[in-house]
Amino acid sequence: MKETVLDVLMYLLENYQTGEFADTGNQDTLRDELVAAGFPEDEVRHAFAWLDGLAQQRQLPLVFGPEGAMRLYTHDEMERISTECRGFLLYLEQLGILTADSRELVIDRLLAITEEIDLERVKWVCLLVLINQPEAEEAFMQLEDMLYYQGDFLH
């Protein structure tokens, strides 16, 4: 089975504390542990690049229109992110789990993965983005609750 960047990221999310994989000083040790666990070195390297990209995007100021404005997707985004996935992102916004800022980070990080974007991947990327947002602890816990405790959330 070919492990993907998202598989590495999901493994990190499920097996390590956020600070452990977000701390760049700890990445060499984690990289060794992930390779020892059977993940391909290329995918591990890409996973850490993905996390670095998330950290960089978080530092950029985001400017949006008035509250409640609708997000229009570009042609490229619509080709990569299905109607079902875009609908799920809108649903999370309506629930207050995603803000306009976190939605944009999710879209950016979805486009940064090379594999096909399906609903399961969208859900995991949402979790990964929220866990890396200090102000989004409650939103992360809501999404995690949906994922783990409300039945077939991922399937």
Image: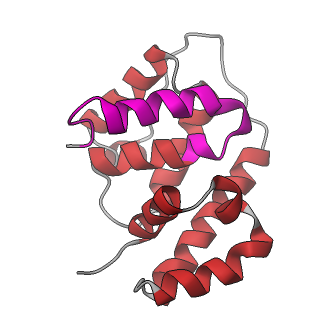
Confirm whether the magenta stretch covers residue 148. Answer: yes
Tell me: 117 left or right of 110.
left
Tell me: 80 left or right of 11.
left
Q: Is residue 86 visible?
A: no
Quarter that holds the N terminus: bottom left
Residue 60 in which image quadrant: top right
Residue 145, image x, y percentages: 41, 31
- In terms of depth relative to the viewer, which is nearer, 22 or 49? 22
Quarter that holds the C terminus: top left
Residue 136 in which image quadrant: top right
Residue 147, image x, y percentages: 35, 37
Residue 75 in which image quadrant: top left
Residue 24, image x, y percentages: 76, 70
Tell me: 62 left or right of 6.
right
Q: How is the image coloured?
A: secondary structure
- In terms of depth relative to the viewer, which is nearer, 18 or 103? 18
Which residue is found at the position 52% from the left and 43% from the top? 106
Tell me: 110 left or right of 21.
left
Which residue is found at the position 73% from the left and 38% from the top? 134
Residue 58 vertical position relative to residue 100 in the rendered view, above or below: below
Q: Which residues are magenta?
A: 129-154
Which residue is found at the position 58% from the left and 40% from the top? 130
Residue 69 vertical position relative to residue 120 in the rendered view, above or below: above
What secondary structure prevails in the magenta region? helix
Q: Is residue 54 visible?
A: yes
| Total residue callouts | 0
Confirm whether the magenta stretch covers residue 126. Answer: no
Which residue is found at the position 71% from the left and 57% from the top? 19
Residue 132, image x, y percentages: 65, 47
